[in-house]
Amino acid sequence: MRGALVGTAVTLAAGALLTTAMTTASASPPTSPGTGVEASTARPVLVDCFFHRNVRPTDFILACGDGNSRLTGLHWTQWGPEGAKAEGVNWVNDCKPYCAAGTFHQYPVVIRLSGERQWKKHPSFERYAQISLTYTGARPEGFNQVMTYPLWD
């Protein structure tokens, strides 16, 4: 009988914790940990691979499928409806002889975000639709000095 009481108490406590967690989660807007995103539509967001909204992230994965291109050490000097600008490093896998055995190389870049658009998944937010990387020194083999990519919605 005592075992049944303990089991019931544990089940009730777990249910209460789950209910509290679900109520808290549904009452507040989803954000990415450490991004400082608030429930405000005043600033556009940068949508990441997991469809989290970010404002001034310190790193960002460009190649969502395989992670072979990533921006790190981002230092933002501008963020607003007119665009965003940062400096950082683009880590790119050379995929030689193939990607799993490749080597990551770092390239200094200036990042620009532009093309503010309504985010289909969360229409109350504006998101950046395009990212441009300008390589300030060496760049990956086959890359232009300026590379521009559409951002996911």
Image (cartoon, rainbow, N blue to C red):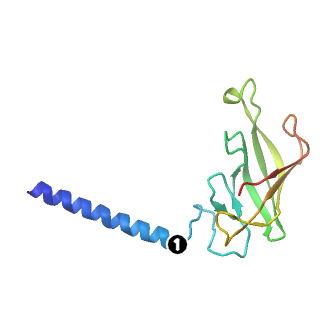
Q: From the image, which quarter does the C terminus lie in?
A: bottom right
Amino acid type, callout 1: Ser
Tell me residue 70's x, y (percent).
Answer: 72, 46
Tell me residue 129's x, y (percent).
Answer: 78, 59
Residue 106 against residue 9 in the figure, above or below? above
Tell me residue 31's x, y (percent).
Answer: 59, 65
Q: Residue at x 48, y 67 (%)?
A: 25
Q: Residue at x 69, y 75 (%)?
A: 41
Few, some or many C-alpha atoms within 10 Å of disc 1 (few <14, some 14-19, many ≥20)? few
Residue 95 against residue 68 in the figure, above or below? above
Q: Tell me: 9 left or right of 153.
A: left
Q: Residue furthest top?
A: 97
Q: From the image, which quarter does the N terminus lie in?
A: bottom left
| Circle 1: element type | loop
Q: Residue at x 65, y 51 (%)?
A: 49
Query: Which image quadrant for residue 52?
Result: bottom right
Query: Which image quadrant for residue 37?
Result: bottom right
Q: Nearer the viewer, residue 45 or 79?
A: 45
Query: Which image quadrant for residue 42?
Result: bottom right
Tell me residue 7's x, y (percent).
Answer: 19, 56
Residue 2 against residue 101 in the figure, above or below? below
Q: Tell me: 5 left or right of 29.
A: left
Q: Residue at x 56, y 70 (%)?
A: 29
Q: Which residue is mark 1?
A: 28
